[in-house]
Image: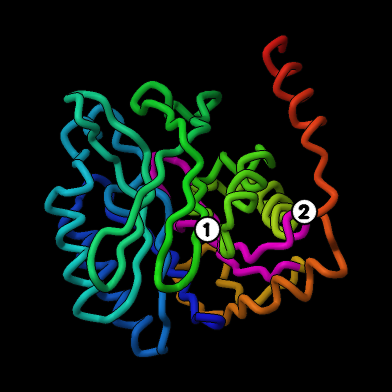
Amino acid sequence: MAKISVALAQFSPKQCDKNHNIKTMEEWVEKARHRKADMVIFPELSLTGYVCRDLFYNLAEPVDGPSVKAMEKVARDNSIHVIFGMPEESGTKGVIYNSCVVIGTTGFLGRYRKMHLPTATVFEEKRYFRPGYEPTVVNTPLGRIGLTICYDLFFPEIVRLLVADGAQLVVCVSVSPGVRRDYFETFTKARAMENSVFLAYVNRVGIEDGLQFWGGSHLLNPNGETLARAKYDVEDLVVGQVDYDELKRVRTFLPTLRDLRPDLLEKLSEKAKTI
């Protein structure tokens, strides 16, 4: 499929209330379907909200649990792909991940476990979540989708790995507070341009325990140009068109992937061990 329609659904999840948030996401999915979207993307931890602390251990589910099954039905009933964030329980009880799940019209397609967990100032993700270890690209009928979560964008090597693995669209689901708005608006454009890839950034809105989230979700083309942008600070749904044929055109004139230097990446690996 050369062209797809992507919906970015930024909303304010109800803190620690999965049933409410599933119902809310279903309503947003229906809105996206009416706008003829092929895929709808929700923010990081949209199933539960962000500040759940020790409640995460009770809220977390495996990817074959009831919440994913409920969203599979939503995707199937609306003939749409859905990406959303959730606390994932691993096969080992008491071990949980901050994960992003991809669901197609036939069911679960894949998931990514957040690799970079911010744990400084007001952020305490390492207290609850185990970091993931695998950059993840999911094969879907809508193309090869690379997945990232929020703080991952601070590390350009992860997006480069996804694109080297054939990602045509990189998705970043996020819960960025307002003080980090300039960071993410810079990083998303840079990641799209330096890798000549489509990038969808979906951030939540609302306030939890004094944290205010700014929204501003956006879809960028491989030149870093904006294809769709949601409002700041309020719930919103925007839809943009992705034309994968554009990847070849852009990479012809901006051949950053051709000019990659594996020897430098090897040096970075060695230097990182000494930091």
Q: Is residue 96 part of the magenta span, yes or no?
A: no
User: Residue 80 appears in which quarter of the rendering?
Assistant: bottom left
Residue 123 image position (x, y, % from top left): 48, 30
Left or right placement of residue 207 versus residue 60 in this view: right
Residue in view at x 58 percent, y 57 percent: 166
User: Who's the residue at 15% across and 62% down the image?
Assistant: 70
In the image, residue 209 sits, relative to residue 214, either above or below, namely above
Q: What residue does disc 1 label?
A: 171
Amino acid on which the number 2 mark rests in the picture: Leu
Which is closer to the viewer, label 1 or label 2?
2
Q: Pick whichever of labels 1 and 2 is earlier in the sequence.
A: 1
Image point 60% across, 73% down: which residue? 229
Location of mark 2 (residue): 257
Dot 2 lies on which element?
loop
- The answer to which quarter of the image holds residue 81 is bottom left
Taking depth in this image into account, of 61 and 46 the one nearest to the observer is: 61
Q: CA distance from mark 1 to mark 2?
A: 19 Å
- Magenta region: 193-222
Q: Which color mode does the image show?
A: rainbow
Quadrant containing the C terminus in the rendered view: top right
What amino acid is at disc 1? Val
Quarter residue 90 falls in: top left
Disc number at residue 228? none
Magenta region includes residue 204:
yes
Residue shown at 79% from the left, 71% from the top? 250
In the displayed structure, 51 sits above or below 169; it is: above
The residue at the far top in this view is 274
- Left or right: residue 167 versus residue 183 is left
| Image side of residue 112 versus residue 264, left or right | left
